Amino acid sequence: MNSNFRNMLVACAVSSAMLLGACASTEEKPKPAPAPAPAPAPKPAPKPEAKPEAKPKPEAKAKPEFLNIEQKIELQGMPFGKAELTADNKAELEKFMGDLRKATKARAAVAISAVVVTGHTDRIGSLKYNMGLSERRAVVVKDMLVSQGVDQKVIFWEGKAFKQPIPVTKFCDNKMKRKQLIECLSPNRRVTVEVVGRAQSLAKPKPEAKPEAKPEAKPKAKP
C-alpha cells in the first residue's frame, strides 16, 4: 500500500474520531429527574372537646314544717248594760293580736285562717235583751279587729247572752244588793276571741342520733 494513501486513511480516521467526539460532546445531557415532592405534613389530631364539668346538685331543702295555732282571749269586765270596750279591753286585744303577728323563736308570724268572736252578758235581765246585748258586744270587737287589719271574711261572730257564765260567778248570790251583784257578775260581761291559723316552725331540727357502736366481743379464754 502506498504510504500516502495510508496517511490519508489515518487522517480520515482521526477526523472521523474527532467529529464523533464533537458530536458526542454536543449532545444534551439528560436532565435529572425532579426530586419527589415532600409528603404533606400530617394534620394535627383534633383536640378532644372538653366535657362541661358536672355541676354539683343542689342539696334538697327540707320542706318547711307548719304549726297549727289556736289562741284565745277573754275580754272581761265590760260596762253593765253597754256594748263598749274598756281601755283595758282594748289594750289586751291589741297585745293579743300583735303577739300573733310577731315571730318567735319557735314559729313565724301566724297566718290567720279564722276568728270566732262571741259576746256574753251577766244573768241580770231577760234572755231576749241579753241576747241582743251580747251580739252588739261581739260586733264591737269584730269591728276593732277589722280596723287592725284582720280580713272581715274570716271573722265569725255570735251572741250567747248569759248561757255560758264564768264558773266563779256561781257564788254571786241574787240576794246581794244590786250594785254588789253587778260587780260580782262583772267577769260574765265579756267577749271571747278565738283565733285559728298556721305558722311556719322555726325550731331547728334535731340531729339524727348515730347508732351506738356495739362493743366488740372479747375472745373466749381457752381452757
Image (cartoon, rainbow, N blue to C red):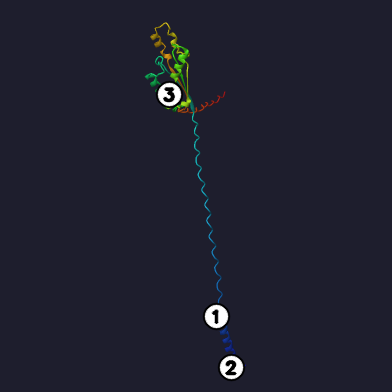
Name the kind of residue labelled 1 in the image: Thr
- Disc nearer the start of the sequence (2/1): 2
Residue at the outermost left position: 87
In percent of width and height, residue 83 lies at 41, 18
Graded by Cα atoms within 10 Å as few (under 14), some (14 to 19) or many (20 or more), the crowding at tag 2 reads few
Q: Position of residue 131 (x, y in %)?
A: 47, 15
Q: Is residue 161 visible?
A: no
Q: Which kind of residue does numbered mark 2 sit on?
A: Asn
- Pick whichever, 20 or 204, lies toward us: 204
| Three-letter amino acid code of the residue under disc 3 | Asp
Q: Which mark is residue 26?
A: 1
Gap between marks 2 and 3, in whole Å?
166 Å
Tell which tag, 2 or 3, sits nearer the viewer.
3
Q: Place residue 219 in its image quadrant.
A: top right
The residue wearing badge 3 is 143
Tell me how far mark 1 sits from mark 3, CA to CA. Answer: 133 Å
Q: Which mark is residue 4?
A: 2
Q: Position of residue 188 (x, y in %)?
A: 43, 14
Q: Nearer the viewer, mark 1 or mark 3?
A: 3
Image position of 174 (left or right of 222): left
Q: Residue at x 60, y 92 (%)?
A: 5
* Viewer-side label of 2, 1: 1
